[in-house]
Image (cartoon, rainbow, N blue to C red):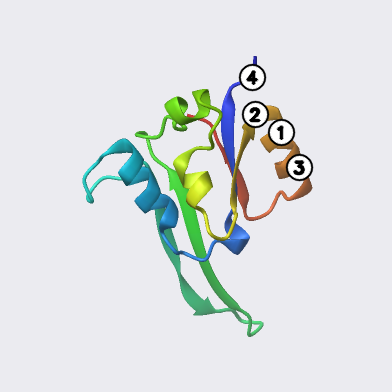
Amino acid sequence: MSHGAIYIDFEFCSGCHSCEIACRKHLRIANDKDGIKVLEDRPYQQENGAWHWDYIAYPTELCDLCEDRVAEGKLPSCVQACQAKVLEFGTIEECAEKLKKKPKKAAIFVP
């Protein structure tokens, strides 16, 4: 049996922080702790004139992929709450296949 993973597409993360809030509520942790954290790679203009401005969601050591929710057939709370749908839950193999198709500005998280 394969373990679960989260596929994260950084290209389209809007920085809304919904994943952080849902995770804190689910884990019942204080506002100064995170099971998933969204960082901002500040905006700057590149030499070619294009703007770079990324939000990067990354699960922390507190993340257990909501094993209790997943055991009930639900999605992890961060995936359920993601408004931009950049977080996807699946097996490691399923997430790896997605990463093969988009090897730039994407990652897989396995706790």
* Marker disc for residue 94: 1
* Left or right side of 62 for 96: right
Q: Which residue is mark 3?
A: 100
Number of numbered markers:
4
Where disc 4 sits, the SS reads loop
C-alpha gap between disc 2 and disc 4: 6 Å
Three-letter amino acid code of the residue under disc 2: Thr
Nearer-N-terminus badge (4/3): 4
Q: Are marks 2 and 4 in contact (CB under 8 Å)?
A: yes
Task: Report the residue at 49% width, 56% height from top.
Answer: 56
Spot occupied by residue 57 in the image (x, y as percentages of width and height): 47, 52
Spot occupied by residue 19 in the image (x, y as percentages of width and height): 44, 51
Mark 2, Cα crowd under 10 Å, few <14 / some 14-19 / many 20+, is: some
Mark 3, Cα crowd under 10 Å, few <14 / some 14-19 / many 20+, is: few
Three-letter amino acid code of the residue under disc 1: Glu
Q: Is residue 15 above or below residue 58?
A: below
